[in-house]
């Protein structure tokens, strides 16, 4: 607690009260000029030191590059959402601002000096330059198609040849079979589109009646409903796709370590699960150990 912000009321009262405690010694000290000077110096120095010690430290500023709105994970210009809340609550001693970028722009943010931390870290040209956190967020992805097409999609290999809409570098987090079939140069890349953000991904799906989208179910439902589309018009194909888990990337080691500690605390106290329930995200996406 700092007394500096309490003005001229509290400080004189404290000084007056404590001087009264030292009154017997003060009366003796006043009879000796040198002793009087020493006594007053000790009192004033003590108060100055105490006042300095109790002033709160300035929060560490952190600018985090994060994806554009993708409810329920990032909402209202990164003012809230599951992902936003997890980051803020894992770093309580920090002053955090968010910089929203496309999926392709996020991995370049620290290198360009635009941010000192990145959400959804997947790939960097120089990965050893940065410090990576534990997994902090997970997404449950489905293959979703237009119901009137009646596509038979029972495995990842059935996606080859489809007009597939995904996000930037999706092949790196959707399992080994997907990576084998849809990496650059692989046979599945022929009709393969990487959208720049979740909203564009969903809009592109509804514009193309032949398309199949790979996306987190909660994100797809939110944007589809906002755009006036019904979930009755689509099929969700239950092919095996792993939970897509992501880490944070930090320019410096200390905020990474602090983030991991804060995240572990959220998990151990059950707060992470409560946040998931708050935003309607299925428990299966929980990344806590």
Image: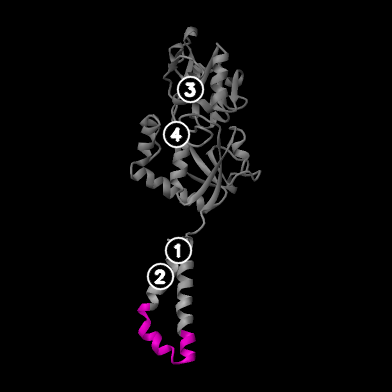
Residue 181: name its quadrant: top right
> What's the colour scheme?
one colour
Between discs 2 and 4, the one toward the N terminus: 2
User: For the residues carrying marks 4 and 1, which lies nearer the camera in this image?
Assistant: 1
For residue 220: magenta?
A: no
Distance between mark 4 and mark 3 Cα atoms: 15 Å
User: Which type of secondary structure does the marked residue at label 2 adopt?
Assistant: helix
Between discs 4 and 3, the one toward the N terminus: 4
Distance between mark 2 and mark 4 Cα atoms: 53 Å
Q: Nearer the viewer, residue 202 or 177?
A: 202
Q: Are marks 4 and 3 in contact (CB under 8 Å)?
A: no
Query: How far across and down, in percent of the image, does residue 85 sit?
Result: 45, 39
* Mark number, residue 138: 4
Tell me which secondary structure the magenta stretch mostly adopts: helix
Q: Nearer the viewer, residue 99 or 257?
A: 99
User: Which type of secondary structure does the marked residue at label 1 adopt?
Assistant: loop
User: For the residues carrying marks 2 and 4, which lies nearer the camera in this image?
Assistant: 2
Residue at which label 1 appears: 3
What residue appears at the point 46 percent right and 87 percent down from the top-left corner?
36
Residue 241: name its quadrant: top left
Residue at the far left: name it: 269
Q: Is residue 240 above or below residue 43?
A: above
What residue appears at the point 44 percent right and 46 percent down from the top-left corner?
90
Residue at which label 3 appears: 220
Q: Is residue 169 left or right of residue 261?
A: right
């Amino acid at each position: 607690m700092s007394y500096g912000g309490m003005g001229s009321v509290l400080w004189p009262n404290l000084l007056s009260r404590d001087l009264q405690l030292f009154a017997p010694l003060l009366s003796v000290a006043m009879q000796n000029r040198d002793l009087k000077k020493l006594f007053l110096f000790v009192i004033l120095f003590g108060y100055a030191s105490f006042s300095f010690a109790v002033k709160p430290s300035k929060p560490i500023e952190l600018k985090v590059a994060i994806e554009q709105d993708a409810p329920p994970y990032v909402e209202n210009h990164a003012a809230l959402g599951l992902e936003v809340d997890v980051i803020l609550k894992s770093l309580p001693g920090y002053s955090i601002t968010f910089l929203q970028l496309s999926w392709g722009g996020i991995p370049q943010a620290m290198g360009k000096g635009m941010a000192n931390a990145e959400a959804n870290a997947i790939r960097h040209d120089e990965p050893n330059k940065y410090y990576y956190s534990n997994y902090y967020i997970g997404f449950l992805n489905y293959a979703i198609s237009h119901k009137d097409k009646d596509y038979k999609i029972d495995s990842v290999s059935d996606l080859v040849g489809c007009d597939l809409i995904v996000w930037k570098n999706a092949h790196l987090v959707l399992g080994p079979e997907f990576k084998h079939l849809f990496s650059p140069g692989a046979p599945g890349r022929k009709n393969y589109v990487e959208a720049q953000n979740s909203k564009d991904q969903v809009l592109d799906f509804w514009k193309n009646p032949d398309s199949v989208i790979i996306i987190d179910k909660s994100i797809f439902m939110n944007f589809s409903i906002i755009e006036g589309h019904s979930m009755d018009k689509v099929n969700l194909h239950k092919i095996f796709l792993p939970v897509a888990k992501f880490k944070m990337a930090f320019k410096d080691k200390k905020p990474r370590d602090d983030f991991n500690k804060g995240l572990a605390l959220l998990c151990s106290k059950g707060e992470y699960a409560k946040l998931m329930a708050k935003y309607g995200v299925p428990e299966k996406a929980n990344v806590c150990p």
